[in-house]
Image (cartoon, grey):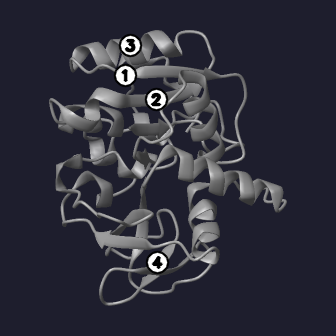
């Protein structure tokens, strides 16, 4: 199952279109690039997009999905959350996702062609990295054979940084780890925090570097929207990034 937790981060300015709907360097939005790059079968058959419950948002998303012929579940949340992981948990609970299903979570910067992802048999979790030196979703330290050793949002561990793409062995494992993180008093319920919890518990976590040129490692959209926003995208401000 692929999950796009569009309301994962709280405290966003509602007057600024979320980054997943803004184009980088004047190109198509990250959402459009993602939908255009989805394969015709396989994981795309179980796509979940989570959004804030605001007027017109669901209709806008249905329109973009229809334009690309993509089927997806949409879940509306009434409020922002404490991070992507909490958003994902609420969305999975709303649709009754099967607990044994593998889980892939895509942050805004990671909305890319999924065909390049290598299988990681036996690993509990996996994340994608970029090598361009920009701390998208935390700095990454790993060993020479691809095992994840440390993940930090505060300091540069290496030239690698997370792109916001995470994979877990199952929905059940995701829920178990997140529940333990929350019981420990964690207020940061991001995917990075969940992976740090998994590292502390000794899980087998891996990392891999995204091929150069994929959308997940291209420049991130600026904080402000482009000067000219098409009329049909006027609903952007109703979403949260």
Q: Which residue is at the far bottom? A: 144
Inter-mark Cα distance, 4 to 2: 26 Å
Of callouts 1 and 2, which one flags the residue occurring earlier in the amino acid sequence? 2
Q: Which residue is mark 1?
A: 72
The residue at 43%/67% (across/down) is: 162
Q: Which residue is mark 3?
A: 62
Work out whether residue 144 can be spotted: yes
Callout 2: helix, strand or loop?
A: strand
Contact between labelled residues 2 and 3, with CB atoms less than 8 Å apart: no
Query: Which mark is nearer the camera, 3 or 2?
Result: 2
Inter-mark Cα distance, 3 to 4: 35 Å
Of callouts 4 and 2, which one flags the residue occurring earlier in the amino acid sequence? 2
Inter-mark Cα distance, 3 to 2: 10 Å
Query: At which x and y percent is residue 154?
Result: 63, 77
Q: Which residue is mark 4?
A: 140
Q: Quadrant of residue 230?
A: top left
Of callouts 3 and 2, which one flags the residue occurring earlier in the amino acid sequence? 2
Inter-mark Cα distance, 4 to 1: 31 Å
């Amino acid at each position: 199952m692929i999950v796009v937790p569009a309301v994962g981060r709280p405290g966003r300015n509602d007057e600024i279109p979320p980054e997943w709907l803004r184009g980088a360097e004047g190109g198509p939005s990250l959402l459009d690039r993602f939908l255009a790059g989805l394969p015709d079968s396989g994981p795309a058959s179980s796509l979940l997009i989570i959004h804030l419950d605001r007027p017109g948002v669901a209709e806008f998303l249905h329109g973009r999905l229809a334009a690309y012929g993509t089927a997806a579940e949409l879940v509306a949340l009434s409020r922002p959350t404490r991070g992507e992981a909490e958003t994902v948990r609420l969305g999975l609970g709303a649709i009754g996702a099967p607990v044994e299903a593998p889980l892939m979570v895509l942050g805004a910067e990671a909305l890319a062609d999924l065909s390049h992802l290598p299988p990681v048999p036996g690993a509990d979790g996996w994340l994608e990295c970029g090598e361009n030196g920009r701390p998208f979703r935390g700095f990454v330290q790993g060993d020479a054979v691809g095992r994840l050793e440390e993940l930090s949002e505060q300091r540069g561990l290496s030239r690698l940084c997370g792109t916001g793409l995470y994979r877990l062995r199952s929905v059940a494992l995701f829920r178990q780890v997140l529940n333990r993180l929350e019981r420990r008093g964690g207020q940061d319920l991001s995917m990075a925090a969940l992976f740090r919890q998994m590292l502390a518990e000794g899980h087998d976590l891996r990392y891999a570097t995204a091929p150069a040129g994929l959308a997940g490692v291209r420049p991130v959209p600026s904080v402000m929207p482009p000067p000219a926003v098409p009329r049909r995208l006027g609903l952007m401000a109703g979403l949260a990034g």
